[in-house]
Image (spheres, rainbow, N blue to C red):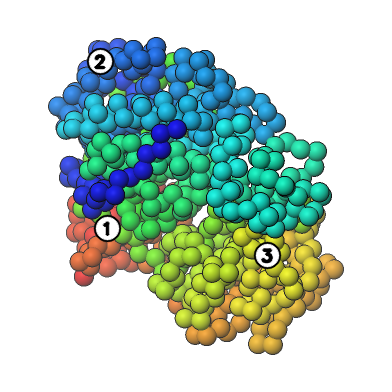
Amino acid sequence: MRRRTTPDSFDAAAVRPWNAQLDGLGFGGDYNPEQWPAEVREEDVRLLQEAGVNVLSVAIFSWATIEPREGELDWTFLDETMDRLHAAGIRVALATATASPPPWLTRKYPEILPRLADGTVLHQGARQSYAVTHPVHREYALRMAARMAERYGDHPALALWHVDNEIGCHVPRDYSDAAAAAFRTWLADRYGSVEHLNTAWGTAFWSQRYGSFDDVLPPLTAPMFANPTQQLDFDRFSSDALLEYYRDLRDTLREITPRVPTTTNLMTTSATKGMDYFSWADDLDVVANDHYTISADAERHVELALSADLARGVAGGEPWMLMEHSTSAVNWQPRNRPKTPGEMLRNSLQHVARGADAVMFFQWRQSQAGAEKYHSAMLPHAGTDSAVWRSTVELGATLGRLAEVRGSRVAARAALVVDYPAWWAAELDSHPTQDLRYMDEVRAWYTALWNRGVTVDVVTPRTDLDDYDLVVVPTLYLVDDAGAANLASAAERGAVVVVTFFSGIVDEHDHVRLGGYPGAFRALLGVRTEEFAPLQAGERVAVVGKAVGGDATADLWTEHTHVADGTEVVATYDDGTLAGGAAVTRRDVGSGSAWYVGTRLDRAGLDALVTCLVEESGLTPEVAAPAGVEIVRRQAGDGTTWLFAINHTDEAAVLDTPSGTELLTGSAVDGPLDVPAGAVRVLRTTA
Ligand code: GLA
């Protein structure tokens, strides 16, 4: 395989910003002109301009159009598209066209097809039917990327490279022979000797000891639970293999066009756990994210906020691009609801409030054929006489009024710790309960903070926490010593640190830290748990204490916890086998404090507890707002701030804000800020 690496001469500082040629925020979407005849493409230009679109993602799925038979290249549609968009003043995020290999490639080399753990082959006919580790596929994909760079690298419409598409979306774990071989190489690099692997994997158990790396396989479907560390390392390997695929394509592009920025679209939703995006961040010139709300989720706007904050966390706080979301319904959920009037605008501005400098969609024009024909678009089947089209045009105008927020950063004094390896490890099989879902815990805490109007930065256990007054650590099952020490030092320095059940249990190899749970956090929290006592489905226990609002209930998890001297029990179990035992504790640590929550509180109990924690950490809301009115602040280095007020309710809200200028209505505000039901207001204030 031809392995490219970024040349030593590469100058990262010379890479131009993706939005260097835009005046304000990016607005656009995926554009698939190959699906349409010439007269429609002509009409596109007029309507794109009418909507105010300034950036489009092009050629994501164009490989088979450009190269219908091996070596026969037809660039007509793409040449025309690039020129036409340039003439219209629209910039292009040009894809490598590799997101789906053409049929001739998988027919010629069926060995590049990916496989499931049970050996099922994932055939061509849909998309993403390739093993990222297969050398033949890599060779063809790199060649395609190089051709794109050679042909369009100097094209004036080119703003950035869009590598592949949602890498790992459909095949986050591939169990093909190519993947197995790459896994063995990855393990040899990680462990150096098979004896080190045996120690890390605990292979003295169940006669799993390996005599050679050659005997190691991915965790294929087996008679019983596969070795947990093998599963965890396969998760790590798979994330790295997907990243390496990105890097190879990126380096190919970089060699030919060293000044053009490169990215790929991530999927930081609470359902996508395949990739450790924090470990991908350094390789992206700008973080790009895709997000779709879930019809069945009554609090989808809160989940959206978490996804946006996670994208900003991956970006280390820098502005990022919303590369895809939907104007209305999608096609891939069991029941796909359209968005209500105003919802798409609120969704879009939530992303902007939380750091996005571009709002883009899948896709520009709704397809007439293919599996996504019932997925909404900026221009729907109904045409321009439609609410969706009017909302597209309205959004374009609105983003135009918000041009000045570009480049500013989001203000947050609370941190929420999220860690992908901890997520993978927490959900392994053969655990105390099968009911634990890591993101449920993250989301419950995020929602309680959102309800209190607290903006959080999503961080990892390794992030420098000096800027935070409150650090929330939900179910960090796996943590290494450095991560645990970093969290403890935040409390010493003065932060309120709260850790929840099933945290600090194992080291990076998924070996239990002995001497009582939660091993890594025992000293910080001043607690020691002898045994876990997970609850049965539907079982609840009562929890009492002022910190949980008097009376609360809990489900999923309890544990038998002893407290050390100096640790205060602030809530206890009130019934069940642990009645009278510690459920929530608190301890002074250095200039801060450390709280432990050994169970899963109901919503009211968690809200009460978060209220205590917010008060103790001295966090004050940006602006007092009624429930359901989201307040987020972006700020520039010169002291200018933009207060976003997003009203998700059916009632008008009146907010007591500083004076300033409201950008959507263009009016001066000197007194209360009115935010009509379902509306958004953005108030600029200057220091
Ligand atoms: C993903 C893909 C797009 C499209 C949308 C549909 O985000 O990147 O190509 O399939 O999903 O929601």
- Kindly identify which residue carries mark 3: 505
Give the residue type that dot 1 points to: Ser
- Kindly identify which residue carries mark 1: 408
Q: Position of residue 156 (x, y in %)?
A: 16, 33
Q: On screen, 138 above or below 562?
A: above
Q: Label 3's element? A: loop
Give the residue type that dot 2 points to: Thr
Using residue 295 as the reference point, say whether residue 146 is left or right of it: left
Q: On screen, 98 above or below 350?
A: above
Give the residue type that dot 3 points to: Ile
The answer to which of 429 and 40 lies nearer the viewer is 429
Q: Is mark 3 within 8 Å of ligand 1?
A: no
Q: Position of residue 182 (x, y in %)?
A: 56, 39
Q: Residue at x 51, y 31 (%)?
A: 134
Res. 457 visible in picture: yes
Q: Quadrant of the C terminus?
A: bottom left
Q: On screen, 454 above or below 362?
A: below
Kindly report the distance in space between the C-alpha atoms of the residues bearing marks 1 and 3: 39 Å
Kindly report the distance in space between the C-alpha atoms of the residues bearing marks 1 and 2: 40 Å
Q: Label 1's element? A: loop
Q: Quadrant of the N terminus?
A: top left
- Kindly identify which residue carries mark 2: 76
Q: Which is nearer the N-term, disc 1 or disc 3?
A: 1
Q: Position of residue 74 (x, y in %)?
A: 29, 14
Q: Tell me the crowding category of disc 1: few under 14, some 14 to 19, or many 20 or more residues within 10 angstroms, Cα based.
A: many
Q: Tell me the crowding category of disc 2: few under 14, some 14 to 19, or many 20 or more residues within 10 angstroms, Cα based.
A: few
Residue 398's quadrant in the figure?
top left
Q: Tell me the crowding category of disc 3: few under 14, some 14 to 19, or many 20 or more residues within 10 angstroms, Cα based.
A: many
Q: On screen, 312 above or below 36?
A: below
The answer to which of 404 and 152 lies nearer the viewer is 152
Q: Label 2's element? A: helix
